[in-house]
Amino acid sequence: MQPRPDPHRPERLNAAWTFFRHWLKAPLTTASMVPSGEELAARMADQIRADDRFIVELGPGTGALTGALLKKVPAGADFAAVELNEHFATSLGKRYPALQILQGDATHLSQLLAEGGHGGREVDLVISGLGILIMPDHVSRAILRAILEVLAPEGRLIQFTYRPRSPIPRSQLNEFGLSSRRVTAAWRNLPPAFVYEYRRR
């Protein structure tokens, strides 16, 4: 029996090629050579809860995670994506016309949310596809500070990594008063990925 053709294969191949070209141009701001796989997207989307009213995705890139996340956003909840790369932001807008995309640097998260009409609003869940591990320490610390500035007291940060340890080092966890736990893994992802949850202690 012949396998069914995948109608989304050309779209995925195009996204992967686009992602790879941008990684070649800027490897420090594009976390990986390839976009995330379907299993990882599903595992990240599983972290969304029914009572999450405002969800923010950081670093959606070509939207490899975004589609799965949008399917899990609770009815009546708001979802915004923050993307630094202008080309990715434009492509994402064409792929998901109803998605609110805030183009800019995650270190200015509060300002970007305010410009998007969410000024002063607390975020319940931040889902990050940023390459925290490869960032300079001062940049990752600035991003964490920006996230905590808008995160609700009981809010959560979900971050994936391709290494089997927390992408946020112990020194930063202590500095920002965060607890860390690995919530799941995507073993069939290429490469295998691990999903961590961070909360205020």
Image: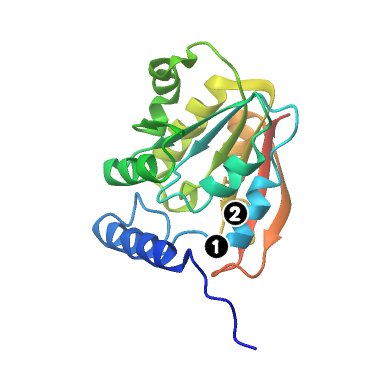
**Front residue of 136 and 36:** 36
User: Residue 163: image x %, image y %?
Assistant: 58, 62
What residue is at 39 percent from the left and 23 percent from the top? Answer: 112
Q: How dense is the environment of label 2, judged by Cα within 10 Å: few (below 14), some, or many (20 and up)?
A: some
Quarter placement of the C terminus: top right
Is the residue under label 2 in contact with that under label 1 (CB below 8 Å)?
yes
Q: At label 1, which amino acid type do we have?
A: Gly
What residue is at 74 percent from the left and 27 percent from the top? Answer: 51
**Front residue of 60 and 140:** 60
What residue is at 28 percent from the left and 62 percent from the top? Answer: 21
Which residue, given by chain and number where applicable, does mark 1 sit on? Answer: 37
Q: Can residue 33 be seen in this view?
A: no
- Residue 99 horizontal side relative to residue 169, left or right: left
Q: How dense is the environment of label 1, judged by Cα within 10 Å: few (below 14), some, or many (20 and up)?
A: some
User: Residue 155: image x %, image y %?
Assistant: 67, 27
Q: Distance between the residues labelled 1 and 2?
A: 6 Å
Which residue, given by chain and number where applicable, does mark 2 sit on? Answer: 41
